[in-house]
């Protein structure tokens, strides 16, 4: 008597999919947080950009305006040399880069940035738009 076993060609694919979406495939990496960036406007008067950079210090971060865009760049390099350990040099680096297009009404000369508790907050004020000019309608006879 022969046993017939059904073969599912997608079973391995489904197992891999479960690993990916349940996080078990990432193992120790899943605790690493990717820096996030939030961008919003307040009262149509300013744009706020918050970059969550918990692993960077203020000296590691560069903020500038380039060709109508706000550029936030952070780089951190660490190097350790210890001949007593099993390695000679241990190096690590991490970086962050965001380029955010500024609206035409942004006042690039008045942008301010500050860092607190690992969050970089950049405030981009908007220029005041000219008020609409009222045109009187003449009464023609």
Image (cartoon, helix red, strand yellow):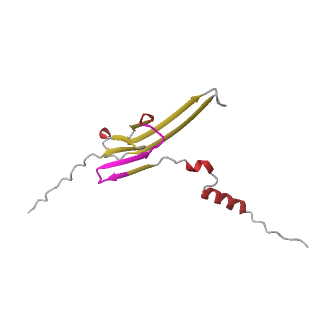
> Residue lying furthest bottom in this view?
1
At 53% across and 38% down in the image, what residue appears? 94
Does residue 44 appear left or right of residue 52 in this picture?
A: left
Residue 23 locus on image (x, y percent): 60, 55
Q: Quadrant of residue 2?
A: bottom right
Residue 42 is one of the magenta-drawn residues: yes
Chain part drawn in magenta: 40-57
The residue closer to the viewer here, 44 or 30, is 30
For the C terminus, the image quarter is bottom left
At 75% across and 65% down in the image, what residue appears? 8
> Residue lying furthest right in this view?
1
Does residue 76 appear left or right of residue 86 in this picture?
A: left
- Say above or below: 9 vs 24: below
- Say above or below: 80 vs 117: above
The residue closer to the viewer here, 139 or 106, is 106
The residue closer to the viewer here, 106 or 88, is 88
How many numbered marks are there?
0
The residue closer to the viewer here, 24 or 95, is 24
Does residue 83 appear left or right of residue 2 in this picture?
A: left
At 16% across and 55% down in the image, what residue appears? 135
Residue 132 locus on image (x, y percent): 21, 53
């Amino acid at each position: 008597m022969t046993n017939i076993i059904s073969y599912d060609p997608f079973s391995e694919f489904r197992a891999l999919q479960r690993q990916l979406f349940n996080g078990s495939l990432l193992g120790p990496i899943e605790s690493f947080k990717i820096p996030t960036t939030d961008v919003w406007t307040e009262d149509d008067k300013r744009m706020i950009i918050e970059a969550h950079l918990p692993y960077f210090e203020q000296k590691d971060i560069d903020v500038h305006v380039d060709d109508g865009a706000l550029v936030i760049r952070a780089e951190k390099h660490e190097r350790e040399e210890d001949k007593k350990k099993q390695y000679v040099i241990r190096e690590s680096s991490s970086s962050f880069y965001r380029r955010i297009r500024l609206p035409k009404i942004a006042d690039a000369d008045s942008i301010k940035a500050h860092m607190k508790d690992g969050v970089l907050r950049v405030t981009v004020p908007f220029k005041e738009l000219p008020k609409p000019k009222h045109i009187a309608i003449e009464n023609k006879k």
